[in-house]
Image (cartoon, coloured by chain):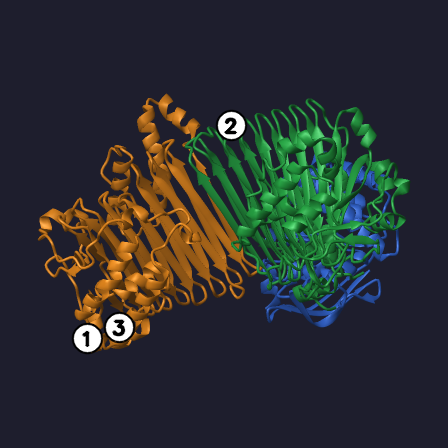
Amino acid sequence: MLKINNLHASIEEKSILKGLNLEVKAGEVHAIMGPNGAGKSTMANVIAGKEEYEVTDGVIELNGEDISELAPEERAHNGVFLSFQYPVEIPGVSVTNFIKTAINETRKAKGLEDMPAKDMLKMIREKSELLEIDRKFLSRSLNEGFSGGEKKRNEIFQMAMLEPKLAILDETDSGLDIDALRIVANGVNKLKSKDNAVVVITHYQRLLDYIVPDFVHVLHDGKIVKTGDASLALELEAKGYDWIKKELV
Amino acid sequence: MELLKDKILSSYVAFENDININSDVHDIRTEALENFEKLGFPTKKLEAWKYTSLNSILKEDYSIFPNKCTAVELADVKKYFIHDIDTYKVVFIDGKYSPFLSETTHDTIDVCLMSAAFAKPKYKPVIEKYFNKVANQDNLTSLNTAFAKEGAYIHIPRNVEVEKPIQIINFSTCADITTMVQPRNLIVVEENAHVQIIERHQSLTSNAVLSNVVTEIFVDKSATVDVYKIQNDDINASLVDNTYINQKSNSVASVHTFSFGGNITRNNLNFYQNGEHIDSILKGVTIIEGKQHVDHHTLVDHIEPNCESHQDYKGIYDERSTGVFNGKVIVNKEAQKTNAYQQNNNVLVSDKATINAKPQLEIFADDVKCSHGCTIGQLDDDALFYMQQRGIPQKEGKGLLMFAFANTVLESVKIPEVKSRITKLIAEKLNVNIGFDL
Amino acid sequence: MSKYTEDDLELELKTKEYEYGFYTDIESETFAKGLNEDVVRAISKKKNEPEWMTEWRLEAFRVWEKMTEPDWANVKYPKPNFQEIAYYSAPKKKPKLNSLDEVDPDLLETFKKLGISIDEQKKLANVAVDIVMDSVSVATTFKKTLGEKGIIFMPISEAIQEHPELVKKYLGTVVPTTDNFYAALNSAVFSDGSFCYIPKGVKCPMELSTYFRINEGGTGQFERTLVVADKGSYVSYLEGCTAPQRDENQLHAAVVELIAMDDAEIKYSTVQNWFPGDENGKGGVFNFVTKRGLCETNAKISWTQVETGSAVTWKYPSCILKGNNSVGEFYSIAVTNHYQQADTGTKMIHLGKNTKSTIISKGISAGKSQNSYRGLVQINSRAENARNFSQCDSLLMGNACGAHTFPYIEVKNKSAQIEHEATTSKIGEDQLFYCNQRGIDTEKAIALIVNGFSKEVLNKLPMEFAVEAQKLLEISLEGSVG
């Protein structure tokens, strides 16, 4: 599904990713862990195509197609979804209106007609129940005045609506209390299938109790320095990241 | 008004007798006089004077060149100084320098007189470079420029942090004539220097006085200037204060204006940001009563990127008094990443009091954060009830709330003695017993 | 991939063409250019007006002659030569219409192009429409339905004939002929407009609507609208404007007067899309409009406007809150692009006790345009417990435009509570990326964000208009990509 080869990326001439390799197959869950400043969020943003980052070397392939020259919305149309660490506020635009626009723009890109309102409503009802989202919440302005937990739940709700092939969850666990964490994780698990893949970026092991990864990667100084199974996450939790750093020297 | 204008124009010849007319400065004066002749006094027809009429005070037959009328004893006027700290002082009585009350210096810094600076060749380069370079050409500034002769001259060289504040005080004393004075101050603060200025105009007579002051302040790179204007004059004294501040990169300039006294007070406060990373701070408290009139007319011209401005003006108006706040923020096309904030809050205490506010934004750059807020209202009834419930009588409770309302502006005052003096003045104006000595 | 920058956006905006730029060839009868007392008399005669009306016009003309065009607004434009304008232009075959079938087919075609098919509106929207084209009312529908309720809704020229007592009583009482330069001009030369009277206690069962359109070249349009809502009545009134694309500037100087008597409510909504001029600032309509409403006790007047057109807009729909407990509202979206200039806002004059006013103004500037909010909130000394809340938000797109706020606040009563807030913002890169990531391209994202920014005002429009307004916002700001 996703194949990243020797990815180098920088922002304002500062090099952040320095030869990152990653392969994610359909049906898999990967966790990316690492200390602050390792380049975790940069990786997520570069895959999604954020303009500020300059890709200086390497390829990002999605289902065999190089997507590194595509606009962010084109990547989204191809099935890339990024759950933002800090979702932005868009005053006056309701959650419903926003997701409706997103779905129909994606359908338009695929040469499809707008989704009929009836189907849209049905889908919204289903997915909001799945994520235990109060219907009133959907008429509020996007992320405006949302609590941390509401913002993250809204991200997963959008993911559920857009049904991406590759979902990247950037620190989705931060700012969540335990109940919200459970709801979000359950949502992700229910959405998981053999046809899609999930990349979970997290600082802590906590989320991985709920979303069990097939692979855990440690990102350090712009590279993946260690890969293991779910047990690696526990080891990191116990020993901290210094252990990895020492091992590297 | 026309009479006064004629008198002023015709007295220019007499004025010229007294000064060196063979200088560049005099050319500037003559040009300014022509300008004033053309423009005349401002009237309400001018947008900038829509809410302030000078008609009532321009009827007076002012003496244009008052002689020093009365001798002033330090003991009589000590209370008008910030006297509990060591300061430099430049003091004028009826427009004439008072060496007796002053304390000037030429040690590293120059704190002295404009008349001396105009006269001595030593100061010529500074005068040529700065005099009348930031002041604009409007009616009353031109009038002042035409008669520019005396005032404070302050020059702080690079990297000097002036350890004590400088007080500029103008007394008016004439008991038998009404007087009009045109003080002209020039303050040049070079790179990375720091100075604090306290300015006051005080009439010691019950005769009408009109002060038309122009102060030019140049704040070079990384310099800091703090100005405190204390306006608590006699009820027959009126003031037009024209202050122009030119700031360069990384400089900080603040002006606090405390308007409690006087008949008509008009503050034209103008900031021009010629550089990046500049901070301009404009604050004011106005508490007036009777038929007093205070007009704050501010301008912050954001010319270059990455600068900030902060404005916070509070006003409390009792009896038949009138307050005006006209705050204009311009963000030029080049001035991206500007942060400009403006706040103006007012309380009307009496049914006969009036407030006119005109907070303006003119924005030509897109990546900026600008906001202004303006409120006119009363005191919080819930807070008042809360106080009454705890046994504080309504009158005292109201006073306390107003005191709290006005006092927030003082947080940014850096000289503790000024802060405590103003706090006391506010308490006095509001009839509040603050109960303890600050 | 290439980054979509603000420069790209600007480029797109430049290439956007005026959607309603066409000209329908309907034979018109036009007066020779120029203005003097004879022309004023001729207009009056043409309309077969009674003597009092002719005198009223002449008086206005004499006042106007002595006035000068105001220049305090934050707009720059070549002052029109008022002797180069034809002051009367009417479709020659003035139809006596009993039904829509009798309307000139060309004219109907025009309305179809405007997307305001009368038939459809009649069927679907339940809207009664009075259409003023080049100054003369062409068709008023729904007369019968309204007639049963005693509602008068007709061209003002007919009202002068059929209800002279009403017109005479109210015309010029809110906007006197001497009010300002353009109002005086309008009073002297207006050729038509709409008149509406809602009797006591009647809730008008449908939205009343007028479409204005300038068709003939070199003509000015001067409509006069008078809406009188008698005690306890209610009416919602819509006004739409379009003009074909033309090189020369066209003048539009309308006057709208609203009278809301005790306990009455008037909602007045405008979608203004006069031709804004081309991308180089050539042509376009000068829109100098005086709109004012008078509220008696417990009355309410609500102005909602979406202003996307005109080269120059000078317009301040205002409320005089004369009666106790009366309410004034002003909701405005003003979009300027290319070389457009808008100086618009409101006046809320609080005279009565417990009067309330709300001002929500959203200015969106793009291209090389200048967008100004100018407003006055005045609390008079007897207006106990007056309340005002004002919010003026500006959104800037690109770095060649300007946004300006000139609020005047004058308070003479201590019990007043006034709150004024203004903010300026741009569309954030973060917001665009977020939308992009969800598959929404930048152009659509901008439309979405602008609609969100304007939502508080769009929500105030009647349903049929809101959709059109939303579309107009997009057209005004979007490029033609995709």
Circle 2: element type? loop
Viewer-nearest of labels 3 and 2?
Answer: 3
Residue found at x 39% / y 45% = B324
Q: Residues within 10 Å of mark 1 (few under 14, many from 20)?
A: few
Q: Establish whether labels 1 and 2 are both on one chain.
A: no
Q: Is residue B147 above or below residue C461?
A: below
Q: Chain of mark 1?
A: B
Front residue (pair C83, B179): C83
Direction from residue C277 to residue C409 in the image, left or right: left
Same chain for the residues under marks 3 and 1 in the image:
yes
Mark 3 lies on a secondary structure that is helix
Q: Chain of mark 2?
A: C
Q: Which amino acid does the dot numbered 2 rest on? A: Asn
Q: Work out how far the residue at label 1 is from the one at label 2, CA to CA, in angstroms.
A: 66 Å
Name the colour assigned to chain C in the rendering: green
- Residue with the mark numbered 3: B26
Q: Amino acid at mark 3?
A: His
Q: Is residue C365 left or right of residue B387?
A: right
In the figure, what tint was chain B given? orange
Marks 3 and 1, how far apart at CA: 15 Å
Q: Is residue B436 visible?
A: yes
- Dot 3 and dot 1 residues touching (CB under 8 Å): no
Q: Which residue is mark 2?
A: C354
Q: Which residue position is annotated with label 1?
A: B120
Chain A: drawing colour = blue
